[in-house]
Amino acid sequence: IPEDRQLKYIVYNFTENREDVSYTFLVTNRSIYSRLTLSQTGYLQRHTLIPPAWVWNQFWSTPMDRLCDMYQMCGTYSYCDPNTSPVCNCIQGFNPWNRERWDLRDGSSGCVRKTPLNCSTDGFLPLKKVKLPDTNMAIVDRIIGIKECEKKCLEDCNCTAFAKADVQKGCIIWTGEIGDIRNYVADGQD
């Protein structure tokens, strides 16, 4: 959680292995209490309680960008960009699935291919500076590099996208529909 990294009185632990992906924190200053909550509407919030007030104060909340940080704002095969109007944009080679809804600024139905998929001739187009798609339909291979990843993906007609999993090695391969992508001016992944 980027906003928390500034706090010297909290020790953070992020665990990722075959059985578990978890985030824990420990407040080292015994006079401060902190809690994370996830609201019904999808907001993750950190609250702090500092004596003598004994009132929970909201320290931060995410998503900060109420449009593009909301899950699946723009549907499949599209990306959200807060600097465009409308904010939902189809990935190159795709058109809005429901043009009427799209024209009314509702991109939640996503996009569909302009032409049928041809596994022997179609390839991949790069998306730059994005939040990677939802990993629900993804496979992570921590051993192979990006070139091997692309080759593996091109050999599988069910592969819809791939990306680097880490700075040095590792690969994420998506099969099936991809969604929940957003564009960033800076940062993001390619």
Image (cartoon, rainbow, N blue to C red):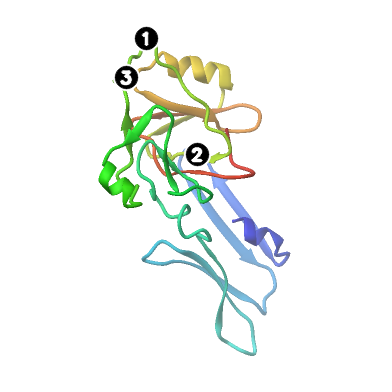
Q: CA distance from mark 1 to mark 3?
A: 9 Å
Q: Which mark is residue 120?
A: 1
Label 3 vs 2, first from the N-terminus: 3
Looking at the image, which residue sits at the far bottom? 52
Q: Can residue 141 be seen from the camera position used here? A: no
Number of the label disc, if any, that sits on residue 117 = 3
Q: Amino acid at mark 1?
A: Ser
What secondary structure is found at the residue carrying circle 1?
A: loop
Which quadrant of the figure has residue 3? bottom right
x 56%, y 58%: residue: 24
Of residues 131 and 68, the one nearer the viewer is 68
Q: Residue at x 64, y 44 (%)?
A: 186
- Residue 163: x and y in percent read 52, 29
Left or right: 48 as drawn, with respect to 140: right
Location of the N terminus (image quadrant) = bottom right
For the residues labelled 3 and 2, the Cα–Cα distance comes to: 22 Å
- State the SS at label 2: loop
